[in-house]
Amino acid sequence: MIKSEHMLKGKNIAIVGAGIVGACCAAHLSACGAKVTVFDRAMPGQAGPSRGNAAHIAASAIFPLAAPGILLDALPMLLDPKAPLKMPLGQWPKLMPWLVSFMLNANKKTYQANINQLGEFNQSVYKDTEQLYQSAGLSEHLHRDGALYLYESGASLDKSQQEFAARQRFGFDCHRLDAEQIYELEPDLAKIFSGGYLIPGWMTVSDPKKIVSGLMDYCYKLGGKFICEDITALTSTGHGVKVSFKNGNSAGFDQVIVAAGVNSGPLVKKLGQKKLLTAERGYNLTYTRPGITINRALMFADRGVVATRVDDGLRIGGWAELVSDDIPVNQDYFSRINGIARELFPALDSAESYPWMGARPSTPDSLPVIERSETDANIVYAFGHGHLGLTQGPTTAKRVAQLLVPG
Ligand SMILES: Cc1cc2nc3c(=O)[nH]c(=O)nc-3n(C[C@H](O)[C@H](O)[C@H](O)COP(=O)(O)OP(=O)(O)OC[C@H]3O[C@@H](n4cnc5c(N)ncnc54)[C@H](O)[C@@H]3O)c2cc1C
């Protein structure tokens, strides 16, 4: 805890959202001595993308999606059923404001500025994660096995060189490997790769939902509580904030944190502020008896999927489906991901698996929204972590604590 955080002692703080970001804030603020109440319409970590994500602490993933040339790359992908980008036609009109802002971020200068912001933010991720997990008794769930980025085409391997040089500049160690070195490290891979990069510092967790519940348990141990409620509005009272529930009741707090993932938008809108946020849905399969082993996190750069060893087995998936409405899960995507998984691991036993879809809360610039509300300094926003909520949760919690301290 840093010195100024002692000022949070005894403060009555509500957190809307018990996903990974809300849970990290709950754990850290409780450790600072605040009286924390967490609200969620579902049980902690059970509803959103925090439940079944790929389990990576991906600190060196510092590249925003809005990159120069994205338009040219995206158009063929939208026409290819096996490509990782999806945007159902009916969703286009409602997505337009987000897409326009996304495209405005895709110029060289803004892209570089966004990389710098992500790179700086992510530099303390490993330290913050280790500290918070250790305090919460979760260190045994954190694995420091590294990650391997894999490229099938020599052209994409060469093209990626600049990205790995940028990671190095932010202090993230990485080494280029040839195909033979890759197969030595990961013998169960299909022999289709031309090379890759090893990132030794990369971490994973054994089960993202256990991390959320473990952080919440730590919060309870320090006196915090969880209340299952659907929050409909936040209202400034002059000396604090009123939190209104769907059932008509309400409760008052000194300060409130909005960590409601992709659903943060409507709460913020009621406060008179507009934040561009969309659901970027991802799909994965967890093979519970995969019959093969991987020794570290694997990133299949040409496919937009990743593979992770988790407590339940082998998790493979990814993709990005941009939607503005709560449309049904596309079941067909699971069979396509299964097909890709079998191409990547020829000996994979795919007989037993469970499917999962989660909606990443994504901003047009891939930067999380961590700031005081313009309408009331007692309300702090902590959402929009896109692909990196598990990664950035502990660092976000520290930033939020700073924003809650007066001054
Ligand atoms: C396929 C996939 C793979 C991913 N892999 C990784 C990875 O490897 N590493 C990584 O760092 N990130 C990964 N992510 C991203 C990560 O999962 C998200 O960034 C993160 O879960 C967002 O957490 P959150 O707490 O902001 O939101 P959420 O998990 O959505 O939590 C928000 C909570 O708020 C609640 N809520 C919303 N509105 C209200 C309301 N009005 N009242 C009460 N409760 C409310 C919801 O019920 C929910 O529980 C992945 C995502 C996907 C989809």
Image: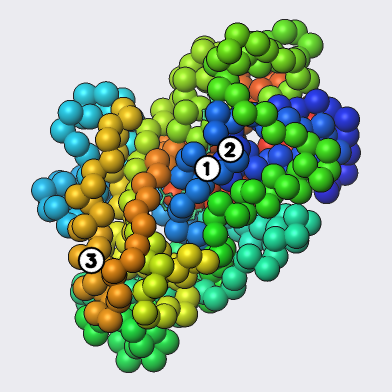
Q: Position of residue 269 (x, y in %)?
A: 48, 16
**Residue at image point 21% right, 57% down:** 335
Query: What amino acid type should be assigned to the residue bearing mark 2?
Result: Met
Location of residue 206 with respect to 348 vertically, above or below: above
Observer-nearest residue: 275 or 221? 221
Cα distance in 3D space between marks 3 and 2: 33 Å
Determine which of the numbered discs, if any, sits on residue 202 in the image.
none
Observer-nearest residue: 382 or 225? 225
Earlier-in-chain disc, 3 versus 2: 2
Residue 108 can be seen, yes or no: no
Asked whether the residues under the numbered discs 3 and 2 touch, taking CB atoms below 8 Å apart as contact, a structural biologist would say: no
**Residue at image point 33% right, 30% down:** 326
Location of residue 337 with respect to 173 vertically, above or below: above
Residue 85 can be seen, yes or no: yes
**Residue at image point 27% right, 35% down:** 328
To which quarter of the image does residue 144 belong?
Answer: bottom right
Asked whether the residues under the numbered discs 1 and 3 touch, taking CB atoms below 8 Å apart as contact, a structural biologist would say: no
Q: Specify the quadrant that holds the C terminus.
A: top right
Query: What amino acid type should be assigned to the residue bearing mark 1?
Result: Gln
